[in-house]
Amino acid sequence: MMPSVCDPRGQPSAWVARFAPLVARGGAVLDVACGGGRHTRLFRGRGHPVTAVDIDLRGLADLADQPGVTLLQADLEGEAPVDLGGAYAGIVVTNYLHRPLLPRLPTLLAPGGVLLYETFAQGNQRHGRPSSPAFLLRAGELLALARDAGLQVVAFEQGEIALPRAAVVQRLAAVRPLPAPDMEGEPEPRPLPHA
């Protein structure tokens, strides 16, 4: 299990919480490698139906029969691809990297859907785990994912953080664009949430 870049009490990532308002009101959200469900709980509390997927769902036992929550126990790194559904208004991934899954994520977004991604990056090995390149994003890797998938980048960060513990991270908020009819085919701009 990778250490978290979140508050150790299980609070939602500040990055995810900041950009959560970009997800269409009431739209379905996919929480990939959901762990204890901090983002499942965040989006459920905001009125979104949430599909939470992880190999171990014990941390979400209290949500097992709750309306608006679908728990999917699956090995995302297994040989057979997992059916994750699709047409999500939002997809959130934190503290998890399985490169074969990366190009699939944008295809699961509905038009206007938001991808929120935050995980460890190269350089984190100076601070401890994870330290294997298999679990560390390369410089600009999330930006390349967004570009290759035709996503509109709303925000991107890459660098070293000190809190809640020293780490090197990459963060992305990107949208499957909706063309703006009055902007010659350019994507509809999104309002930026306050930092």
Image: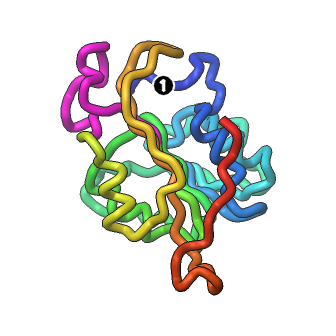
Looking at the rendered image, the quarter that the N terminus falls into is top left
Foreground pick, 2 / 121: 121
Vertical placement of 160 versus 128: above or below?
below
Relative placement, left or right, of 184 versus 26 is: left
Indicate the quadrant where residue 55 lies: top left
Q: Is residue 54 visible?
A: no
Residue 128 forms part of the magenta stretch:
yes
Looking at the rendered image, the quarter that the C terminus falls into is top right
x and y, in percent, of residue 183 in the image: 59, 80
Q: Is residue 31 visible?
A: yes
Render colour scheme? rainbow
Residue 150 forms part of the magenta stretch:
no
Vertical placement of 119 versus 27: above or below?
above
Q: Which residue is at the far front?
A: 183
Query: Residue at the spot x=42%, y=61% of the render?
Result: 105
Relative placement, left or right, of 158 versus 66 is: left
Query: Residue at the spot x=59%, y=20% of the render?
Result: 7
| Structural crowding at the residue carrying mark 1, measured as other residues with C-alpha within 10 Å and reported as few (<14), some (14–19) or many (≥20) | many
Q: Which residue is at the far left?
A: 133
x and y, in percent, of residue 51 in the image: 61, 55
Amino acid type at mark 1? Val
Relative placement, left or right, of 64 versus 33 is: right
Foreground pick, 167 / 157: 157
x and y, in percent, of residue 73 in the image: 49, 49
x and y, in percent, of residue 194 in the image: 70, 40
**Which residue is denoted by mark 1 in the rendering?**
5
Per the rendered image, the range of residues in magenta is: 118-137
Total marks shown come to 1
Indicate the quadrant where residue 22 lies: bottom right
Q: For numbered disc 1, what is the local secondary structure?
A: loop
Query: Residue at the spot x=39%, y=60% of the render?
Result: 146
